């Protein structure tokens, strides 16, 4: 299901993969995020961190009548406050999607799939 935007010049269809790429790119810039995880851990692998070209596997974008609802599966860095990292990701994603797509984001649900210890 694509995101449909209508204007006086016609209709614009944005695929969910493009929206997921925008969401994933915004989230990965936040402090404390190691990477994106797959929403299907058993099928795709439990410990895989998704690369930039596979962000769509870790993000679900659902267009609703009241705005976009986004589910994100992330891996955080050890030693960070998970609630603060999740809040920062929610804020950054909401702002970026609003400015890039011009759509209102009603919910950004964060699912922390793991904690990764960084090598020193």
Image (tube, grey):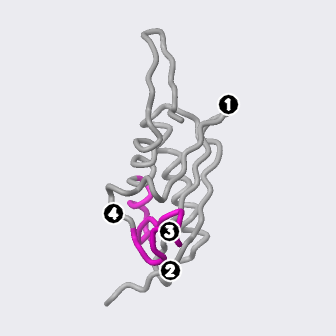
- Report whether 47 appears left or right of 52: right
Q: Nearer the viewer, residue 94 or 35?
A: 35
Q: What element carries label 2?
A: strand
N-terminal label among 4 and 2: 4
- Report whether 50 appears left or right of 58: left
Q: Could you tell me how far apart the alpha carbons at marks 3 and 2 are, in whole angstroms?
A: 20 Å
N-terminal label among 1 and 3: 3
N-terminal label among 2 and 1: 1
Q: In the rendering, which numbered label is found on residue 115?
A: 2
Q: Which of 31 and 76 is in front in this view?
A: 76
Q: Nearer the viewer, residue 60 or 87?
A: 60
For the residues labelled 1 and 3, say whether their Cβ atoms are less than 8 Å apart: no
Q: In the rendering, which numbered label is found on residue 51?
A: 4
Which residue matches tag 1?
A: 65
For the residues labelled 3 and 4, say whether their Cβ atoms are less than 8 Å apart: no
Q: Is residue 102 above or below residue 18?
A: above
Q: Is the C terminus in the top left, top right, bottom left or bottom right quadrant?
A: bottom left
Q: Which residue lies furthest to the bottom in this view?
A: 120
Return the x and y of residue 46 as percentages of the image width and height.
48, 76
For the residues labelled 3 and 2, say whether their Cβ atoms are less than 8 Å apart: no
Query: In the image, what residue occupies the spot 58% across and 54% down?
Result: 71
Q: Could you tell me how far apart the alpha carbons at marks 3 and 4 are, in whole angstroms?
A: 17 Å
N-terminal label among 4 and 1: 4
Q: How crowded is mark 4: few (under 14 residues within 10 Å), some or many (20 or more)?
A: few
Q: In the rendering, which numbered label is found on residue 43?
A: 3
Q: Could you tell me how far apart the alpha carbons at marks 2 and 1 are, in whole angstroms?
A: 35 Å
Return the x and y of residue 8 as percentages of the image width and height.
47, 9
Q: Nearer the viewer, mark 3 or mark 2?
A: 3
Query: In the image, what residue occupies the spot 38% across and 53% down?
Result: 25
Q: Residues within 10 Å of mark 3 (few under 14, many from 20)?
A: few
Q: Which of 39 and 26 is in front in this view?
A: 39
N-terminal label among 3 and 4: 3
């Amino acid at each position: 299901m694509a995101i449909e935007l209508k204007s006086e010049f016609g209709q614009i269809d944005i695929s969910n993969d493009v929206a997921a790429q925008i969401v994933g790119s915004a989230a990965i810039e936040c402090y404390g995020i190691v990477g994106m995880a797959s929403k299907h851990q058993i099928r795709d692998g439990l410990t895989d961190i998704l690369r930039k070209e596979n962000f769509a596997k870790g993000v679900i974008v659902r267009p609703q009548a009241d705005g976009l609802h986004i589910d994100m599966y992330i891996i955080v860095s050890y030693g960070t406050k998970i609630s603060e990292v999740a809040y920062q990701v929610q804020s950054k994603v909401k702002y970026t999607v609003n400015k890039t797509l011009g759509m209102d984001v009603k919910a950004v649900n964060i699912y922390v799939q793991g904690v990764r210890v960084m090598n020193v």
